[in-house]
Amino acid sequence: MSESGEKKRTFVWVKDRSGNEYLCPVDALKDPKDATKEELEDCIDVENLRPYLDM
């Protein structure tokens, strides 16, 4: 645990069938290689991050 007492979360990069990329908490997915549309709702669409990332 961190000093503030918060539990660290693990994230994974996921690409859907259309080629869109998402950053997802690993515990929100049953299978990161086959994430459902409903599971992706708990993820961050990478397109929304591009202005803040050096990609």
Image (cartoon, grey):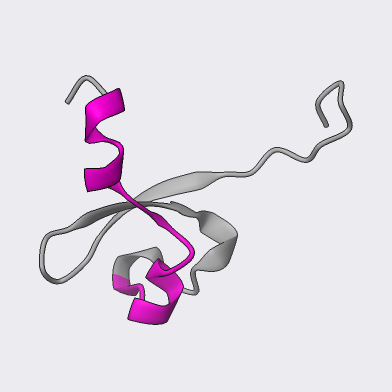
Assign the N terminus to one quadrant of the image. Answer: top right
Q: Is residue 10 above or below residue 30?
A: above
Residue nearer the viewer, 21 or 1: 21
Image quadrant of residue 46?
Answer: top left
Query: Can you see residue 31?
Result: no
- Image side of residue 43 versus residue 53, left or right: right
Count all numbered tags in the image, as a single digit: 0
Q: Position of residue 19 (x, y in %)?
A: 11, 60
| The stretch drawn in magenta includes residue 49 | yes
Name the residue located 42 percent from the left edge and 69 percent from the top edge.
Answer: 41
Q: Is residue 14 above or below residue 8?
A: below
View extreme (left): residue: 18
Name the residue located 27 percent from the left edge and 24 percent from the top edge.
Answer: 53
Q: Position of residue 51 (x, y in %)?
A: 23, 28
Bounds of the magenta segment = 34-52
Q: Is residue 2 above or below residue 18?
A: above
Q: Is residue 41 above or below residue 53?
A: below
Query: Can you see residue 7?
Result: yes
- Image side of residue 33 versus residue 55, left or right: right
Name the residue located 35 percent from the left edge and 73 percent from the top edge.
Answer: 35
Residue nearer the viewer, 37 or 51: 51
| The stretch drawn in magenta includes residue 8 | no
Q: Position of residue 50 (x, y in %)?
A: 22, 33
Image quadrant of residue 36?
Answer: bottom left
Name the residue located 31 percent from the left edge and 74 percent from the top edge.
Answer: 34
Q: Position of residue 16 (x, y in %)?
A: 21, 66
Assign the C terminus to one quadrant of the image. Answer: top left
